[in-house]
Image: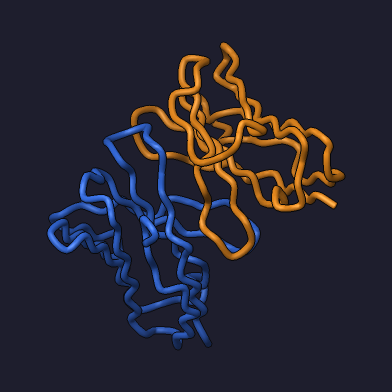
Chain colours: A blue, B orange
Amino acid sequence: RKEVEQDPGPFNVPEGATVAFNCTYSNSASQSFFWYRQDCRKEPKLLMSVYSSGNEDGRFTAQLNRASQYISLLIRDSKLSDSATYLCVVESNFGNEKLTFGTGTRLTIIP
Amino acid sequence: DAGVTQSPTHLIKTRGQQVTLRCSPKSGHDTVSWYQQALGQGPQFIFQYYEEEERQRGNFPDRFSGHQFPNYSSELNVNALLLGDSALYLCASSLAGAQYFGPGTRLTVT
């Protein structure tokens, strides 16, 4: 079983729609969780950290369920510029530890 | 404030050769991690350097080695290149927090 599992997609979603991504992780000792965004042939960029209480940044909402070892990302009112690959990322301890990435979910927003 | 920089941008090598990739961390960051990203996959952790020492290592053979300099910049060396080493090599820097990635070096082994 992979340490971090994501549905690779692709997700093709009309502009303005809401889209949700899910991710599961196998290491129950994992401490920190993130969503990164990666555009084609570019480096991953931190989108947001994920907390048990849930957190929101504009149109983006992330949620963590430690009991189920499940992480989610919700994008509301999707824009063409949201087209990218979204990487679910888990860190074994707090700060400066290795990141374990999922394979990524490819999202394309259709005009 | 410059972000993480990497050089070269692209590189083509032949099987059996050796390669050195370079990374300069974001200003103020003291930790450098290296990742390998094959096409269609997420990045895979190679190793991490802190205070000029290798602090953690992923499941990569000894052909992969590295170094960190007093100014926190880092090098990744790969010996005896294999075709399967073709990938995007990413450097990330951090300071007790989230990791920020450089643009990567795209290595092609022929």
Q: Determine whether, in the image, residue B105 is placed left or right of residue B32.
A: right
* Quarter of the N terminus of chain A within the rendering: bottom left
- Residue at (55% x, 29% y) in the render: B25
A49 vs A54: above or below: above
Please tell me how many numbered marks the rendered image carries. Answer: 0
Q: What percent of the width, then of the height, locates residue B43?
A: 53, 51
B55 vs B37: above or below: above
Residue, far top: B70
- Residue at (32% x, 76% y) in the render: A20
Q: Nearer the viewer, residue A3 or B67?
A: A3
- Residue at (65% x, 59% y) in the render: A41
Q: Determine whether, in the image, residue B45 is placed left or right of residue B79.
A: left
Q: What percent of the width, then of the height, locates residue B94?
A: 43, 32
Q: Nearer the viewer, residue A43 or B54?
A: B54
- Residue at (83% x, 36% y) in the render: B17
Q: What percent of the width, then of the height, locates residue A44?
A: 52, 52
- The quarter of the picture where residue A102 lies is bottom left
- The quarter of the picture where residue B77 lies is top right
Q: What percent of the width, then of the height, locates residue A62?
A: 26, 62
Q: Determine whether, in the image, residue A35 is placed left or right of residue B90.
A: left
Q: Nearer the viewer, residue B40 or B14?
A: B14
